[in-house]
Image (cartoon, rainbow, N blue to C red):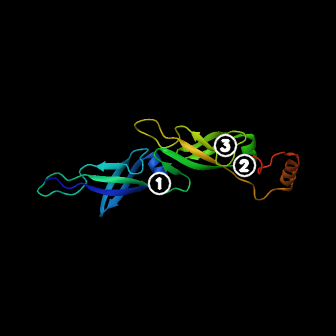
Amino acid sequence: MAGADQEAELELSVAEAFRGGRRRITLDGRGYDVNIPPGVTDGQRIRLAGQGGRSRGGAAAGDLYLVVRIAPDPRYRVEGRDLHTRLPVAPWEAVLGARVPVRTPGGEARVSVPAGSTTGRRLRLRGQGMPNPRGPAGDLYAELEVQVPTRVTGRERDLYEELGKVSTFDPRESR
């Protein structure tokens, strides 16, 4: 009679799940080399054939299934193959529009912030999410967060005061 299948959890960072690779793990004092495919998702099972419970009487051992758990990440929230991140922008980038860098697990990408953008606007970077070995990669959604400088130079203060005098914009009336 074959040995029993066994199951264990394998916690990965978003970066590890994104790029895949080899990882050495130890379970119950026994070492395993695990090939992690790029783009594994939370809950996905990785099968290690013949590495499960031992059999009696010389029959084949069962399989070991590693259930992937993606650890929380301060930069990214994972939803299936899509990634969500915050993208800080300066007030002038939000007002005038700008092309700004955004970090992805695969490196840096650039995204165009449309003029007149506000905090909470989501920009989609198609194909910049988690890889998918069986189809198109997920998307990365960058949520804009307009950041106001906490310290300004004298010149910057003068410019903000001048803007305040000439602007007709009233945020309390624009809703």
Q: Position of residue 153 (x, y in %)?
A: 83, 56
Q: Find the distance from the CA under tag 1 to the CA under tag 2.
A: 30 Å
> Mark 1 highlights which residue?
13
- Horizontal placement of 124 versus 48: left or right? right
The disc, 3 or 2, on the residue closer to the chain's N-terminal end is 2
Nearest-to-viewer mark from 3 and 2: 2
> Mark 2 highlights which residue?
90
Q: Find the distance from the CA under tag 3 to the CA under tag 2.
A: 10 Å
Q: Residue at x 20, y 53 (%)?
A: 61
Q: Find the distance from the CA under tag 3 to the CA under tag 1.
A: 26 Å
Check disc 3 and report its element: helix, strand or loop: strand
Q: Quadrant of residue 148?
A: bottom right
Q: Residue at x 34, y 60 (%)?
A: 26
Farthest-out residue, top: 135
- In-front residue for pair 41/13: 41
Q: Amino acid at mark 1?
A: Ser
Check disc 1 and report its element: helix, strand or loop: loop
Q: Residue at x 75, y 41 (%)?
A: 96
Q: Position of residue 124 (x, y in %)?
A: 58, 40
| Neighbours of disc 3 within 10 Å: few (<14), some (14-19), many (20+) | some
Q: Position of residue 131 (x, y in %)?
A: 46, 41
Q: Amino acid at mark 3?
A: Val
- Horizontal placement of 107 versus 96: left or right? left
Check disc 2 and report its element: helix, strand or loop: loop
Q: Amino acid at mark 2?
A: Ala
- Horizontal placement of 91 versus 6: left or right? right
